[in-house]
Image: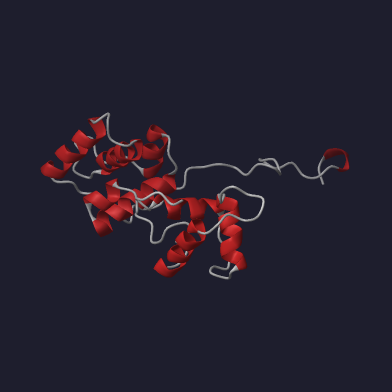
Amino acid sequence: MGAGGMLPAFPFSWHRRPTMAISIPNQYPVCLDSEQRQRLEDAARNGRAPAKRITHARVLLLSDRNRAEGPLTRNQIAEALGIHVNTVDRIRKRFVLEGEQPALDRKPRAEPPVAPISDGRAEAMLIAICCSAAPEGRTHWTMQLLAGEMMKRRIVTQVSAETIRRALKKRTTTVA
């Protein structure tokens, strides 16, 4: 116990862990040839490219082992570019394992965030409902009414008004 029956003094407070730069060996060393370096420099200087593409190019340029000043550490790169060290590691890894273009571009989604309302059959049923008379007391179908009718008829188990809108927007002809 410390002075006056208090807990012992520690070099750090309980609510804040000490911070220190952890030196982790670079598992994915980046070695650029002169052609790659030129393409990445062009990408980093291009003001019209997406910001992430420019940042990824800068990470690879600063990580290059053939750089005149030598490669920077992951912590130095992260601090210089204002990104997280894990981002630096991910970019290096993608460059070494997949190549230059995948490292610069965003990873494509495996599947869309919202699946389509199923198949052509469901869309055909949706069009048929649109072409039918509107419910009693209504002059026309709304997206919400169409979604409710699709679920009521058990064409789909669940669907939003936005999904209905997107499905109808694909149609080139006007649905009455």
Percent from the top left, x then y, of residue 10?
70, 43
Q: Residue at x 43, y 45 (%)?
A: 85
Q: Residue at x 87, y 43 (%)?
A: 5
Outermost residue, left side: 35
- Residue 116 sits in quarter: bottom left
Count of numbered circles in the view: 0
Q: Residue at x 24, y 43 (%)?
A: 64
Q: Which residue, as the protein is rendered here, is positioned at the far right?
A: 4
Camera-side residue of 145 and 134: 134
Res. 29 visible in picture: no
Task: Please identify the quarter of the rendering in which residue 43 is found.
Answer: top left
| Left or right of 67 on screen, residue 9 | right
Q: Is residue 11 above or below residue 121?
A: above
- Give the colour scheme of this rendering: secondary structure
Left/right of residue 101 with respect to residue 140 in the rendered view:
left
Residue 160 is situated, as x and y percent measured from the top left of the image, at 56, 55
Q: Is residue 103 left or right of residue 119?
A: left
Foreground of the two, 130 or 9: 130
Q: Residue 115 at x, y = what percent?
A: 46, 61
Q: Residue at x 13, y 46 (%)?
A: 33
* Residue 34 in view in this figure: yes
When the figure is inspected, residue 144 is found, relative to residue 12, above or below; the finding is below
Q: Nearer the viewer, residue 16 or 61?
A: 61
Percent from the top left, x then y, of residue 147? Answer: 57, 58
| Residue 14 falls left or right of residue 165 | right
